[in-house]
Amino acid sequence: MRLHAIVEDLETARAAVEGGATVVQLRLKGASTDEVVEAGRPFGDLGAVFVVNDDVEAAIRLGADGVHLGRDDPGAERAIAAGLLLGTSAASVVEARAGEASGAAYVGAGPVWATPTKPDADPPIGLEGLAEICAAVSVPVVAIGGIDASNAGDCVRAGATGVAVVRAARDAAAVLAAVDAAL
């Protein structure tokens, strides 16, 4: 869980895994389940935990290891019943505890900082908000939002088990080095 690479394409996923990403999450906003399944077919062979974003049906059809659901995404019970690793999103302690109560194996907490990859994201929670979430749940917490090699270690020092990167996915080795240095 140390480094999640959130990607839209196989080339970036491969680069992230080569750099040390332990989890690859396929996120194709606005794509149909069939499109996600088609794009996701080769991801299971990358040598990392394979998670599908927002689409339980696609995760099941792909034989993915897990699914990550946002606060408003349905399907947590179905995901767990299908044996999928469940990740949930949280921008507050209340949301993190709700995710844990729903059976989440990990919580994605953030955005820690503002990020251009998700313009409709909640306001940044900062390192203090991240630390509060980490202290409030017993499942691993993965920090997300504006994270790169320059600040990944700060997230781990705040209590996160790992970090998730989008823009920095191709710089996975440097991000992972920062995480490891903070452990």
Image (cartoon, rainbow, N blue to C red):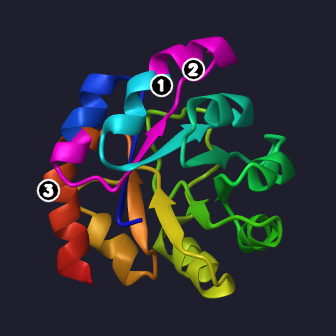
* First-in-chain label (3 vs 2): 2
> In the image, which residues are magenta?
16-39
Disc 3: CA contacts within 10 A as few (<14), some (14-19) or many (>=20): some
- Decide whether residue 30 is among the magenta residues: yes
* Mark count: 3
Q: Which residue is under mark 2?
A: 36
- At x 45%, y 75%, the residue is 160
Residue drawn at x 59%, y 49% as measured from the top left: 66
What label sits on residue 59 in the rendered view? none
Instruction: Find out whether the residues at labels 2 and 1 contact each other: C-beta distance under 8 Å.
Output: yes
Q: Are marks 3 and 2 in contact (CB under 8 Å)?
A: no
Amino acid type, mark 1 = Gly
At x 70% / y 45%, what residue is drawn?
A: 70
- Under circle 1, the secondary element is helix
Q: Position of residue 183 (x, y in %)?
A: 27, 84
Q: In this rendering, is residue 169 above or below 113?
A: above
Neighbourhood count class around disc 2 (C-alpha, 10 Å): few under 14, some 14–19, many 20 upward = many
Give the image location of residue 33, x and y in percent. 67, 19
What is the three-letter code of the residue carrying label 2?
Val
Residue marked by disc 1 = 40
Label 3: which residue?
Answer: 174
Q: Is residue 53 above or below residue 175?
A: above
Q: Is residue 72 depicted above or below 141 in this figure?
A: above
Identify residue type, mark 3. Answer: Ala
Quadrant assignment, res 9: top left
Give 139 or 182, whichever is nearer the viewer. Answer: 139
Q: Quadrant of residue 115?
A: top left
Residue drawn where x is 63% and y is 36% of the image? 59
Give the spatial CA distance, label 3 vs label 2. Answer: 29 Å
Q: Is-magenta flag for residue 56?
A: no
